């Protein structure tokens, strides 16, 4: 079902400020900034090998990322796996009784389809499934 680790989502208060470390110190070139209204965040992808770091900056106080920062501070917010067919993956998980945050795919950054699995199902890690058409 899982292809590879697509990205690691990192909650930050400011993408511009975070880039002073990820871009200027580590030398990772961002591949573009995008707003994702469905998740109330601005995202910036930083490719590292086959995977990416996804910086997530909240655009609204009631976004899940804003709540994450308020409760736990900045840091790793989720782990995202690439899947070939997200509808099929969700159907398989549902059939196995896995608790999901999104029962149907949501629009993600760069035209991806995404859905989150509840962290109670996965030992405390918020897992994102991500289908990209590229
Ligand atoms: Zn993500």
Image (cartoon, helix red, strand yellow):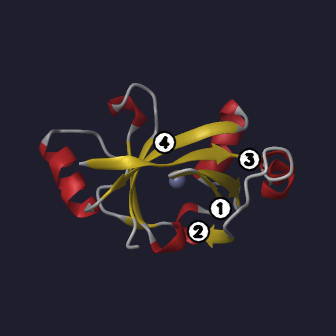
Say above or below: 133 vs 80.
below
Q: How many marks?
A: 4
State the CA–CA distance, disc 2 to disc 4.
Answer: 17 Å
Q: Is residue 121 left or right of residue 70?
A: left
CA distance for labels 4 and 3: 15 Å
Of callouts 3 and 2, the N-terminal one: 3
Residue 134 x/y as whole percent: 41, 73
Q: Secondary structure at mark 3?
A: loop
Which residue is painted at 56% across and 50% down in the image?
49
Q: Is residue 112 above or below residue 60?
A: below
Q: Which badge, 4 or 3, is on the more N-terminal residue?
A: 3
Q: Is mark 1 within 8 Å of ligand 1?
A: yes
Q: Are marks 1 and 2 in contact (CB under 8 Å)?
A: yes
Find disc 2 in the rendering and name its residue: 36
Q: Which mark is residue 43?
A: 1
Locate residue 83, reporting x and y percent.
Answer: 31, 55
Asked whether, in this view, residue 112 is left or right of residue 64, the answer is left
Seen at 45% across and 27% down, the residue is 124
Mark whose residue sits in front, 2 or 4? 4
Q: Earlier in the sequence, mark 4 or mark 1?
A: 1
How crowded pointer 4 is (Cα within 10 Å; few <14, some 14-19, many 20+) is rated as: some
Is there CB contact under 8 Å for labels 4 and 3? no
User: Rounded to the nearest whole Å, what is the CA distance between mark 3 and mark 2?
Assistant: 15 Å
- Rounded to the nearest angstrom, the CA distance separating label 4 from label 1 is 15 Å
Residue under label 4: 79
Q: Residue 107: which numbered mark, if any?
A: none
CA gap, disc 1 to disc 2? 7 Å
Residue bearing the label numbered 3: 12
Residue 63 location in percent, x, y? Answer: 62, 55
Q: Is residue 53 left or right of residue 89?
A: right
The residue mark sitting in front, 1 or 2, is 1
């Amino acid at each position: 079902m899982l292809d590879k680790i697509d990205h690691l989502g990192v909650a930050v208060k400011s993408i511009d400020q975070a880039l002073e470390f990820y871009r200027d110190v580590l030398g990772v070139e961002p591949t573009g900034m995008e707003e994702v209204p469905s998740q109330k965040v601005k995202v910036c992808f930083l490719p590292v090998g086959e995977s990416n770091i996804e910086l997530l900056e909240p655009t609204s106080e009631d976004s899940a990322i804003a709540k994450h920062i308020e409760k736990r501070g900045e840091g790793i917010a989720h782990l995202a796996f690439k899947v070939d067919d997200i509808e099929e993956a969700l159907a398989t998980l549902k059939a196995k009784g896995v608790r999901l945050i999104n029962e149907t795919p949501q629009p993600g950054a760069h035209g991806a389809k995404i859905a989150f699995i509840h962290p109670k199902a996965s030992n405390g890690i918020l897992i994102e499934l991500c289908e990209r058409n590229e």
